[in-house]
Image: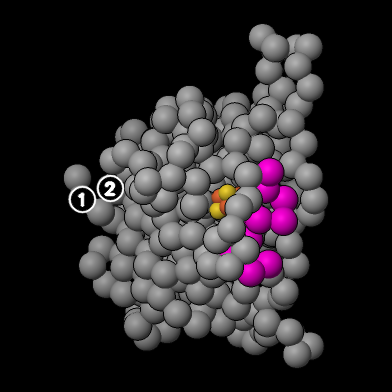
Amino acid sequence: MGTLLNINNLKTHFFSSGRTIRALDGVSFHIEEGEVFGLVGETGCGKSVTALSILRLIPFPPGKIINGEILFRGRNLLSLQEDEMRSIRGQEISMIFQEPMTSLNPVFRIGDQMMEVIMLHQKLNRSRAFEKALEMLQRVHIPDADRVVKQYPHQLSGGMRQRVMIAMELSCHPFLLIADEPTTALDVTIQAQILRLIKEIKKELQTSILLITHDLGVIAEMCDRVAVMYAGSIVEEAKVEEIFEEPKHPYTQGLWGAIPRVDQEKEALVVIPGMVPDLSQPPTGCKFHPRCPYRFDPCDQKKPPLFPLSPGHLVSCYLYEEGKSHE
Ligand code: SF4
């Protein structure tokens, strides 16, 4: 197993009405082959912008990747020509979205949409592409795939549409699947089925997954490692067991404290005071400092780097600078 994706100091900004919105402000992380890596954080923290930056789908204007490196299988995606990028999208890196209707075309039958992707990337003829589409629908446990292949998206339930999207995105056996809130729009029982399906397919195809969610339960259930994002930066990264056992960054502790626990029903949930900052005028230094109960001298002056706590556990907080007390 090696490193599949390595992102270094990625900065994606949006320029609008004379303002610069620093949506990603120096994001770095890597994903190993066959790994499920989670990105978690509140709405607007930069999770989806990270995914769109990897695929170079940031709309320009107003958005632009202004700095960084996205090394995928050894190649920097930011230096590729657009036609090279087009062949990577869908074939080597695929993406499933929260609402499959945004990706499925309502006026084409499911089979035709799947066949188009398969013929484009795998260079198969129509009849082979049809067989492949059918095979993929069966693989994601769609009952009566022969009928579904001839249907339109609106004739399917939300859960079935998400299965179709997974089948379509996996039909070219990508090295990396980006799943952006893949279960948020589904009800709880269907959510569980879709997560089980993603897990099963990942095991079968050995696809690496970048799983984006605000749901800590999904992270705990699915991921090997996780990075917590706040206001366009990663504030903590660790193995899932480690971060759930001992979250270190004050923001991670706040997020974790906000999870209702059935074994502690009398304890009040933690509320993080204040608001998520305006990314066109972010706070100086540590962006969490206006909300942090532990802030001290350097916090509002200089952005804390990611300090290593143990192998693979990194925290962007001055409390963990060498020589500081950690309690
Ligand atoms: Fe709080 Fe300072 Fe750590 Fe930021 S760097 S999280 S303000 S203690």
Q: Position of residue 249 (x, y in %)?
A: 54, 43
User: What type of secondary structure mainly makes up the magenta span?
Assistant: loop
Is residue 190 positioned above or below 47 on the image? above
SS at mark 1 in the image: loop
The residue at 39%/36% (across/down) is 239
Q: Is residue 303 magenta?
A: no
Dots 1, 2 in contact, CB < 8 A: yes
For disc 1, the marked residue is 2
The residue at 36%/73% (across/down) is 69
Q: Residues within 10 Å of mark 2 (few under 14, many from 20)?
A: some
Whole-angstrom CA distance, mark 1 to mark 2, is 6 Å
Disc with the residue nearer the chain's start (1 vs 2):
1
Q: Which mark is residue 317?
A: none
Left or right relative to 201: residue 277: right
Q: Position of residue 78 (x, y in %)?
A: 39, 79
For disc 2, the marked residue is 33
Left or right relative to 68: residue 11: right
Q: Position of residue 237 (x, y in %)?
A: 44, 46
Is residue 323 positioned above or below 86 on the image? above
Highlighted range, magenta: 283-293
